Amino acid sequence: MAEDWDWGFAVAYNAVLQASRAFMFSEGYRSASAGGHKNTFAFMAEAMGPDYEELITYFDRMRSKRNQAIYDVAGLITETEARNLLDRAAAFVHLISSRLAAGD
């Protein structure tokens, strides 16, 4: 079976984006339509604080990479990149889910 690392990367990225948007909405905010992904991560950097700055910066870099993989260059994502994002995405989605459940 052939692996599609671009697609797996995009799905993991989308999980991070949707968790971030859920958190943003729970705080009473919405991102602007133009630059929505970028604005979402800018919000998350502020909302999560310095303890999560490196992680949010990583997700924002992956935003750019995902954009290239989806719209410009097929086969851009390596297995390592896809698996790294998946691991970080799973932990982040769990963190945000816990915060939302706790009402933080």
Image: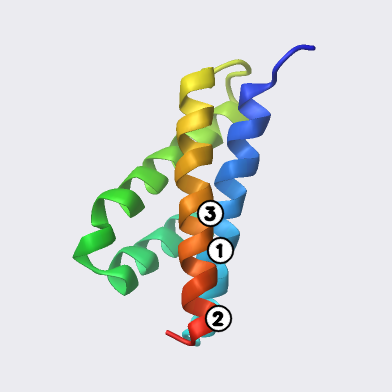
Q: Residue at x 60, y 15 (%)?
A: 75
Q: Image quadrant for the N terminus?
A: top right
Label for residue 101?
Answer: 2
Evaluate if marks 3 and 1 touch, with contact meaning CB atoms under 8 Å apart: yes
Q: Earlier in the sequence, mark 2 or mark 1?
A: 1
Distance CA(mark 3)–CA(mark 1): 5 Å
Query: Which mark's residue is nearer the viewer, 3 or 2?
Result: 2
- The residue pinned by badge 3 equals 16
Residue nearest the observer in this picture, 79 or 74:
79
Q: Residues within 10 Å of mark 2 (few under 14, many from 20)?
A: few
Q: Residue at x 33, y 73 (%)?
A: 47
| Residue 81 vertical position relative to residue 48 in the rendered view, above or below | above
SS for dot 1: helix
Question: Where residue 63 appears, x then y in whole percent?
Answer: 47, 43
Distance CA(mark 2)–CA(mark 1): 12 Å
Residue nearest the observer in this picture, 61 or 53:
53
Question: Where residue 77 appears, x then y in whole percent?
Answer: 53, 21
Evaluate if marks 2 and 1 touch, with contact meaning CB atoms under 8 Å apart: no
- The residue pinned by badge 1 equals 19
Q: Earlier in the sequence, mark 3 or mark 2?
A: 3
Question: Where residue 91 appears, x then y in whole percent?
Answer: 47, 52
Q: Amino acid at mark 1?
A: Ala
| Residue 31 seen in render | no
